[in-house]
Image (cartoon, helix red, strand yellow):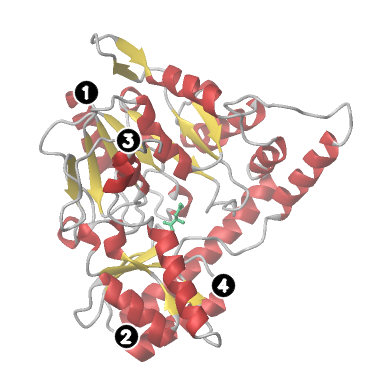
């Protein structure tokens, strides 16, 4: 028998969302008539924007002609998309990013999961708790941790608790580390770091020689104009940060797949001899070895969201989801539940009622109200006692779900 990667056996549980899918599937098999409303995984429901659809059609037609056919594309993305990103996502907000600092990919899950590969096997980590589980799990798989303890926390990771008392924002690590994962707007709590907060992180990273892995997949859902959308709005971040962005939620691309990573040319790591090495050059090397790029029609579709019509269309979809978030917040708060988030993020973080733990509430919610949420403890031990509700659903269903939660648990 071939030797396996033993680190996988340290993983304390299956990946969160398939586990939820398994429980919901079992419930539905046992209760085929139940009308289950899914506000668990953050998956979009609205159809593709007209501009996106048209751009994909046009790209397919172009490739159907000998003159427009495309084979392998550039591994790091076509210039037209990288230029649109640099101009609109960054330039329009006064942030200078060179298109050559952008790497187009097929998703932020892959990017935020794969980035650790270019760092040392013994690189040290700080990770907020609770947070998107990919950051922890991929480092466990890579062997950067010891086994999980009773509370599900892995030895070797410096966890940064995000609690109600801290506004669900992580505090600075107490010991220096190589890598810090940050997610703002935060999945799952919906908390967003202010400019002052990010300035604190950038100053700390620079003083400690750390790199911030900044996941901004939900930046489009920020409604407060004073909140930063990018770590690169903070002076000095170019020397200490990598940013991840995604079209999944902003433009309905969860099934289409397109995202990007920004690695500034100033960002350096150090090799075993203590010499400075460009981090972007390593990611470029990895990308060109392991990835053949995102398909041409998909990159044209992504480009279309920067057109005037495309911007309006995707903004309308974002507004629709944020109106759902408001429905969830208002409905639950009025009935006496404690909720957070949902103002600058498409997730509402609610305290579980009646002393139930996260999974107990998840199960009760499914059984009694036929509503699916995501147990907070699945995002880390500090998520215990909370449940995340996603605003990505049809409004009528979201309203009904809120009504059922109130009916059964208020
Ligand atoms: C979530 O529900 O947290 C996300 O949809 C998961 C993801 O983006 O991979």
Left or right of 112? Residue 177 is: left
Would you call the spot at circle 4 few (<14 residues within 10 Å), some (14-19), or many (20 or more)? some
**In the image as oriented, which residue stretches furthest toward the front?**
1
Q: Which residue is the site of mark 3? A: 142
Looking at the image, is mark 2 or mark 1 earlier in the sequence? Answer: 1
Q: Which image quarter holds the C terminus?
A: bottom left
Looking at the image, is mark 1 or mark 4 earlier in the sequence? Answer: 1
Q: CA distance from mark 2 to mark 4?
A: 22 Å
Count up the numbered dots. 4
Label 4: element kind: loop
Label 3: element kind: loop
Q: CA distance from mark 1 to mark 4?
A: 45 Å
Q: Which residue is the site of mark 4? A: 394
Q: Is there any visible trace of residue 326 in the rendered image?
A: yes
Q: Which residue is the site of mark 2? A: 335
Q: Which residue is the site of mark 1? A: 209
Looking at the image, is mark 3 or mark 1 earlier in the sequence? Answer: 3
């Amino acid at each position: 028998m071939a030797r396996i990667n033993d680190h996988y056996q340290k993983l304390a549980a299956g990946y969160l969302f398939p586990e939820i899918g398994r429980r919901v599937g079992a419930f539905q098999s046992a209760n085929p008539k139940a009308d289950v409303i899914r506000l668990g995984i953050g998956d979009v429901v609205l159809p593709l924007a007209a501009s996106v659809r048209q751009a994909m059609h046009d790209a397919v037609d172009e490739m159907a002609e000998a003159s427009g056919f495309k084979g392998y594309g550039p591994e790091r993305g076509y210039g037209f998309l990288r230029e649109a990103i640099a101009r609109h996502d960054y330039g329009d907000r006064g942030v200078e990013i060179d298109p050559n600092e952008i790497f187009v990919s097929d998703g932020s899950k892959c990017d935020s999961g794969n980035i650790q590969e270019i760092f040392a096997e013994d690189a040290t980590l700080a990770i907020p708790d609770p947070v998107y589980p990919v950051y922890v799990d991929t480092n466990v798989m890579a062997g950067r941790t010891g086994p999980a303890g009773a509370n599900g926390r892995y030895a070797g990771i410096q966890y940064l608790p995000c609690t109600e008392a801290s506004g669900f924002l992580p505090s600075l690590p107490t010991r220096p580390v190589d890598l810090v994962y940050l997610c703002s707007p935060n999945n799952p709590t919906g908390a967003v770091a202010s400019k002052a907060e990010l300035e604190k992180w950038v100053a700390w990273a620079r003083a400690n020689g750390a790199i911030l892995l900044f996941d901004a997949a939900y930046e489009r859902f920020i409604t407060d104009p004073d909140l930063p959308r990018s770590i690169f709005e903070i002076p000095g971040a170019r020397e200490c940060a990598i940013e991840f962005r995604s079209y999944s939620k902003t433009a309905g691309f969860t099934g289409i797949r397109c995202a990007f990573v920004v690695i500034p040319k100033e960002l350096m790591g150090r090799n075993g001899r203590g010499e400075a090495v460009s981090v972007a050059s390593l990611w470029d090397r990895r990308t060109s070895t392991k990835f053949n790029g995102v398909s041409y029609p998909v990159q044209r579709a992504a480009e279309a969201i920067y057109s005037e019509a495309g911007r309006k269309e995707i903004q309308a979809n974002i507004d629709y989801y944020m109106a759902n978030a408001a429905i969830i917040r208002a409905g639950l708060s009025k009935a006496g539940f404690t909720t957070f988030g949902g103002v600058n993020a498409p997730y509402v973080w609610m305290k579980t009622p009646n002393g139930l733990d996260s999974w107990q509430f998840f199960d009760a919610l499914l059984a009694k109200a036929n509503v699916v949420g995501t147990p907070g403890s699945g995002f880390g031990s500090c998520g215990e006692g909370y449940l995340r509700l996603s605003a990505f659903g049809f409004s009528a269903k979201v309203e009904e779900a809120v009504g059922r939660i109130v009916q059964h648990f208020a």
